[in-house]
Image: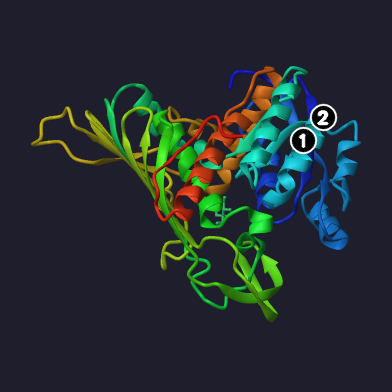
Amino acid sequence: MTEMSDGRELGVGLVGTSFMGRVHSQAWTLASRAFDLALTPRVLAVAGQDSERTAAFAARNDIARSSTDWRSLLDDPRVDVIDVCVPGDLHAVIAEEALAAGKHVLCEKPLSNSLAEAESMVAAAQSARERGIQSMVGYSYRFVPALAHARALVGAGRLGTIRHIRAQYLQDWIVAEDFPLVWRLDRERAGSGALGDIGAHIVDAAVFVTGQRLTGVSALTETFVRERPLPAATGALAATAGSGYGPVTVDDAAVFIGRTDGGALATFEATRFAAGRKNAMRLEVNGSLGSVSFDFESADELWFHDHTVDASEAGFRRIHVTEPSHPYAGAWWPAGHGLGYDHAFVHEVADFVRAIAEERTPEPSFEDGLYVQRVLDAVERSAAADAGWTPVDADRP
Ligand code: SOE
């Protein structure tokens, strides 16, 4: 955070005006207020499905231009970055066309709806990189200070040899059987259900914190509610029912175990049916010298047990990850004042802007996104074989 802005603007074209479009729009605005960046990002244009709603979004977010045609953003020479905040069925086409047009791309997670698309997106990203064009996938939890601090503790050897990775992502927004059939419940649009929507986050967080990748998995998935009312209107994880019913074509929950390339055993659980759990994105890592434990529902806290301390005094202690010395935290408020869900996105786009300015590959890269897709693919193949052991095959197309 030492670079100072030389006043150069980085034009952003935002595609999507729903939950992620809103969070990203705010993140682009706040990034250069919180951090000293060599380039100042500014959202210049937004594309959405409905012209009135997109124009209203533009007005509320102080964005000069709105359109219902995302390709028009690619034609705009002032737009340097395309930010893809739409359902997964559009990720590959928008990202690849944008990279070909010479735009840097930030793409929401999961990278794609299929492994084949992810492979193709990585090929496009690699060829764009040779032309100085960068790309990043939006695994936002990497940018939560407590998780970044957990990674630093693991990296510093404080946990020793990693034995267990225990990850859960628990939500409850579709527990009600009459909750409508929103796009996240449609395989054509979302690729998969809880698995790709939130399971993808914990797969990424596990490799981010421990540096270890899954080599094989055994999985079960289930769709508890197989028909739902068609939606009339939708909001961020909310919707009202219209008339008629349609089939749910994705998993409602996914559980899987795995082995890592570092010799650890891992368990993962992703569900949107955990009544009472709103956004319980949890990760615990146990090593030979200690453990860390995190729950996004208390996002500023990282619990750390140092097993080298005498047993009479050892035990999990709470690190309040709000000190200026903690990752990203120093850009914000005095220690103890805390951050929210949206701040991680500010950190994410700030890191992306830095990578663009410094002409280096940002993390998480499209290759990092491809690794997650390989795991999701293996999980689905294993679940189809009712928990059959399935290698996470690096060579599969
Ligand atoms: C819905 O389950 C959702 O908005 C995810 O799509 C996001 O990636 C996650 O951060 C919060 O929950």
Which percent across, then down, holds residue 274? 42, 64
Amino acid at circle 2: Ala
Residue lying furthest left = 312
Vertically, is 67 above or below 11?
Answer: below
Crowd class of label 1 (few under 14; some 14 to 19; many from 20; radius 10 Å): many
Q: Quadrant of residue 7?
A: top right
Q: Circle 1 sits in a helix, a strand or a loop, which is it?
A: helix
Q: Which residue does the numbered mark 2 point to in the structure image?
A: 100
Residue under label 1, please give it: 96
Q: Quadrant of the N terminus?
A: top right
- In the rendered view, does 152 fall on the left or right side of 395? left
Is the residue marked by circle 2 packed among few (<14), some (14-19), or many (20+) residues within 10 Å? some
Q: Position of residue 193 (x, y in %)?
A: 55, 57
What residue is shown at x 70% (from left), y 34% (from top)? 120
- The amino acid type found where label 1 is placed reads Glu
On residue 272, which mark appears?
A: none
Can residue 168 be seen in this snapshot? no
The residue sitting at 65% across, 24% down in the picture is: 354
User: Where is 354 relative to 28, above or below?
Assistant: above
**Residue 252 % position (x, y):** 50, 63
Q: Are marks 2 and 1 in contact (CB under 8 Å)?
A: yes
Asked if 256 appears above or below 150 in the picture, the reply is: below
Residue under the point 55% across and 50% down:
196
The local secondary structure at tag 2 comes to helix
Relative to 52, 176 lies left or right: left
